[in-house]
Structure formats: C-alpha cells, structure tokens
Image (cartoon, rainbow, N blue to C red):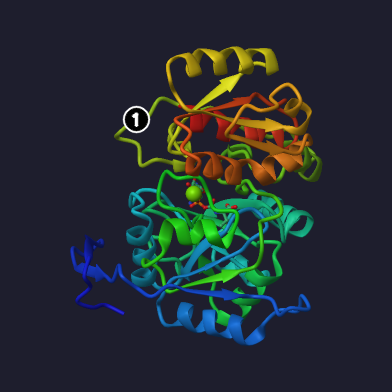
Amino acid sequence: MVAEARHSGFFCVGSGVIRHLQLNLDTQLLNAFLPDGILADEIIAKAAEVIRAGGLAAFPTETVYGLGANALDGNAVAKIFEAKQRPLNDPIIVHVADGAWEELADAHNAEMRQMARALARACWPGPLTLVLPRGGRIPANVTAGLDKVGLRMPAHPVALALIRASGVPIAAPSANRFGHTSPTTAAHVLDDLRGRIDLVLDGGPASIGVESTVLDLTGAAPQILRPGGLSRERLEEVLARPVSIRQRQTPNQSEAMPAPGMLERHYAPGAKLILCKDTPDLLARREAYAAQKLRVGLLITQAQSAACAGLTPQFVMGNALAEIARELYAGMRALDAAGAQVILITQVERTGLGEAIADRLRRAAA
Ligand code: TXA
Ligand code: MG
C-alpha cells in the first residue's frame, strides 16, 4: 500500500508518525450491477477486500458517493483525509448496515437512546446521520477527536452489500476533493480522486443528490447540524417534538469545528455562484455580467428555460425540489466544465428538501 510514489504525500497522525500515501494508484472503476440490474457479488467482494486490507473504495449511496475505509482502522481512515485533502478537524460519518450500530455509540442516556432507536427504526436506511456519544471502538481520527460519532445506514443496495461483505462499519465522507461539490456519479468521483484511491464502485447516479441530514442527539434538545436529504418536518413527526436547525456562527478558530459542514465556503463549484431572486433578476444579472465579458452559466429549471432560450452555457434541471436536489451538483460541475466564470441560479423555497438545497446554494455562493 505504502510505496515510493511519484507524487507521494505525507501527513502526521496523532502519535506524530509520518505516513505516506501513494498518489498514483491505478484507480479501478467497476460496475456494481450486472447488465440485468442484479448486484455483481464478485465486484462487491473485491471492493470489500480493499476495505478489509486498509484501502480506499468509493461507493454509491442514495445521497452522494462516499469514499470508504474501514472505520475501525485509524490508519485506513487517515488515508481518507490525505486522498481528499480534508482538514483533520472535520469528522467522518460511519456507515452501518444493521443493528450493530448501537455498539459503536455510547448512548448512556435513556431519552437519547430512545430517540436514536425511534429514528433508526423510522428513517433508516435513509439520508439521516445521527450524532451520538462515541463508543470506544471508533478511532479518534474518525471523529476528528470529538467525543461524538455520526452514524448512518444508507439506503442503497450497493452500499449496504459492501458494508455487509466487508464485515466492518465503513467511514465515508463524500468522495470529492475537500471543498468541491459532492459527487453524484462515479465519473464525478474519478474527476476528483483518480489516482488517489484504489477503486470506485459504479452504481449509477445518486437518487437524492444532496448529503444526509446530520442530527445531533447529544445536546439538551435534538438539533440539525446540517440540513439534508431527510426533512426537518419528517424528523419532527417521528420524534413528536420540534427540531431546531443550528444557526451558522462566524468561524471561531479555537472551537474544534463541531460541524464542519458548517464551513462557509463549501460544496462549491470553481465558478462564482450568484443567487438570484427570480427569473427577471437572473436575466438582468446575466446581461450585466455578459457586458463585463464574463462567461455566464445558467443553472435553471424547466420552467425558466423558455425565458432563457439561447443563452449558453445553460444546464436545465426539473422543476420539483427533488429534481433540483438530484441535478444540482451535476449542473455545477457541467457548467464549470463548460468554462463558466459565473453561475446564476434562482433561490428555492425553504420547505422539505428546499432547506438543504438553500443551505448548499448559500454556502456555494459564500
Ligand atoms: O450523505 C452523506 O452524509 C454523505 C454520504 C457519503 O453518506 N456523506 C457526507 O460526508 O456528506 P461528509 O464528510 O462530506 O460530511 C459529513 C459531515 C461533516 O462535515 C460534519 O458536518 C458532520 O457530517 N459530522 C460527521 N460526524 C460528526 C460528528 N461526530 N459530530 C458532528 N458532526 C459530524
Ligand atoms: Mg463532503
């Protein structure tokens, strides 16, 4: 695994040991499905072997693609940080496939345990990450030294099969370079991480397209740290109590980044993203930027496409919030690739999935 790589990176882990990561790996892209849509067991087994051996395998989930390593192996997890160029103070979600998740947390308080079980029963597998007190088996670097761990059971047959075949929980952040938009296809993963990871399982485009909702159960009241694929309304329904969304603070260096999804500029395309009020505002701004000789990309819905006919480059998403969530990151990447210097998009309503979309748009525009 560790070798005299052409571009060999190095980094420190807690004990001060310097490790090297090979950055010119021959990253394999493997289809996780057979032509008839059946899971390719041999391919899953191969990826599980990579995980067990301490390597990095990217895999599809219903939200976005994850970059997986054995969550019980601190050395394997350290490679995730290096491959993504992710700051060591950003904790990683641990993915599970069955009831054994309870052993990974230390939900000592009865009310907390009850809420976690109720949510797991109602919402897993699904786009929800539960933050609970960290159990002793989770290495400290997984949680960036925090005494809490984020756990999630993904609703994707490939992810679940991979976790089961590996026989270990899988630590996985989104499979992009740090600060880039999350990948919703295997091709996006390769664009960011080719040569830096062992393998990518292709399971087709992600069905939800924005990351999981991160819910902290360790405080006095449950609190959303990051809005995502599961709505606040649904959480309130399951818990039968109000759930707040944590307000962003101005970055505070001394704080160990309690929810680093909270970094302001995050989930961002290369081009500058501008949020517009409505279609007339979008068209007016397009004209103003074009007058400055800037290449303007439009990230619009079908409902806007007639008004924007002929204005290129443009990427057209569906009108429903679920379609916008699914196509948003692909649209940002496509417009980046088309050379857009500025990307214009219209605000969405903040209900249901709209909360997560609005959060990502605001941060991409920061
Ligand atoms: O949908 C998803 O959540 C995807 C798929 C792959 O599961 N994963 C993902 O991971 O988006 P990542 O690393 O890109 O974002 C995880 C975020 C962290 O940045 C942080 O905000 C929060 O989840 N998080 C994870 N563990 C935490 C912890 N122990 N305490 C507080 N926040 C945590
Ligand atoms: Mg991420």
Q: In which quarter of the image is the C terminus?
A: top left
**Is any part of residue 97 visible from this angle?**
no
How far from the left and from the top, in percent, is residue 180? 45, 45
Q: What residue type is labelled 1?
A: Asn
> In the image, is 185 to the left or to the right of 124?
left
Q: Which residue lies furthest to the front in this view?
A: 310
Left or right of residue 295: residue 319: right
Between 314 and 151, the residue placed more toward the observer is: 314
- Where disc 1 sits, the SS reads loop
Residue 243 drawn at (x, y percent)? 69, 34
Q: Visible in this render: residue 339?
A: yes
Q: Looking at the figure, which quarter contains the N terminus? A: bottom left
- Disc 1 under 8 Å from ligand 1? The reply is no
Say if 205 sits above or below 104 in the image. Answer: above
Kindly identify the residue that appears in the image at 28 percent across and 71 percent down: 22
Residue at the disc numbered 1: 252
How many tags in the picture? 1
Q: Identify the residue at horizontal 66%, vertical 51% (top origin).
A: 128
Characterize the local packing of mark 1: few (<14), some (14-19) or many (20 or more) Cα atoms within 10 angstroms: few
x and y, in percent, of residue 188 in the image: 52, 56
